[in-house]
Amino acid sequence: MDALLRIRGLSTYYYTMLGVVRAVEDFSFDLNKNEWVSLVGESGSGKSTVAYSVMNIVPPPGRIVKGEVLFDGVDLTKLNEDEMRKIRGKEIGMIFQDPMTSLDPLRKVGDQMVEALVEHGIPKDEAKARAEEYLEKIGLPKDRLNYYPHELSGGQRQRVMIAIATMLNPKLLIADEPTTSLDVIVQESIMELLSSLKRMGGSILLVTHDISLAVDFSDRIAVMYAGKLLEYGRVKGILGNPLHPYTKMLLSSVPDLWGEKRIKYIPGFPPDLRNPPPGCRFAPRCPYRMEVCGRVEPRLVRVDDRLVACHMYGGGA
């Protein structure tokens, strides 16, 4: 398949007063056209930083220190701000984690939707008509254009963000925890909205800590831990036969609907990324740890149709 997004050796650090936080380090993966890929892992694993790096909006004091982010063959890390503004929204849309802080609280949502279209050359009258059309597509009456963000519920604000992110039919939609703090009914409707976008030919990169949500909708899953990609493969393979110990433990920590499975927690805590441990970053918490794990960082190796970074599968340097 043709790769729409190809990330190679991406490293993004945050330069704080307490030290350099290596939020994402040497991260590489591909996302194909008309594919849904989910980035999963614990909070602080670097998932959102990958998303911000793709959009080239890493908040200060963070910055991309090395690597390539190739979108349709163009390295986004080499573009200036004016060039990126032409891509954001039109080519790559993004749904942010908290719509209340992403929407301007002092402006009506309709004005914000129209502005996003006008910015990319759509005449104002046409932009207003399209804003009304997309509001109805996401299940909201068009009079909500005259509402301020605080007058909408959390689910309605998230739908507005989805409309803004998709009005220009981007090739890639990045959704950063789009269902956080929403009830399960609203969660389901939002995920179905994203699925409909994929059916129209778009690609989706979902950032989530909820691996069960990713399993239900994704084509492939990328498992992150402490800024590193540990496993990447098709949902069926990862769900039926997880290879990396972290993936196995992450799946075992998810409760089932009937409560028949014993839930297991992952002991210990993620490392301080200002001073990550040598070797495998998961080694201090891994029940399968070997002597080599504490001194040699495993590289990604292919196992059947999967990529996995673990010494149990020959991932030595």
Image (tube, helix red, strand yellow):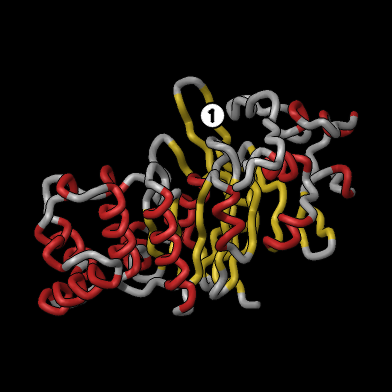
Residue at image location 43% in from the left, 72% down from the top: 197
What residue is drawn where x is 58% and y is 62%?
218
Give the image location of residue 69, x and y in percent: 54, 59
Q: Amino acid at mark 1?
A: Val
Q: Secondary structure at mark 1?
A: strand
Where residue 270 sits, quadrant-wise, is top right
Q: Residues within 10 Å of mark 1 (few under 14, many from 20)?
A: some
The image shows a total of numbered marks equal to 1
Residue 138, x across and y down, in percent: 30, 67
- The C terminus lies in quadrant: top right
Please give the residue where the numbered disc 1 appears in the rendered image: 20
Which quadrant of the figure has residue 244? Answer: top right
Toward the top, the furthest residue is 18
Q: Nearer the viewer, residue 176 or 228?
A: 176
Left or right: where 88 falls relative to 238: left
Residue 125 left/right relative to 178: left
Considering the image in quadrants, where does the N terminus appear? bottom right
For this view, does 27 lie left or right of residue 302? left
Please tell me which residue lies in front, 8 or 108: 108
* Nearer to us in this view, 72 or 100: 100
Residue at image location 49% in from the left, 34% down from the top: 14
Is the residue 61 above or below the residue 228 in the image?
Answer: above
* Image spot of residue 215 (x, y percent): 61, 57
Give residue 272's position: percent from left, percent from top: 60, 25
Q: Is residue 310 above or below residue 44?
A: below
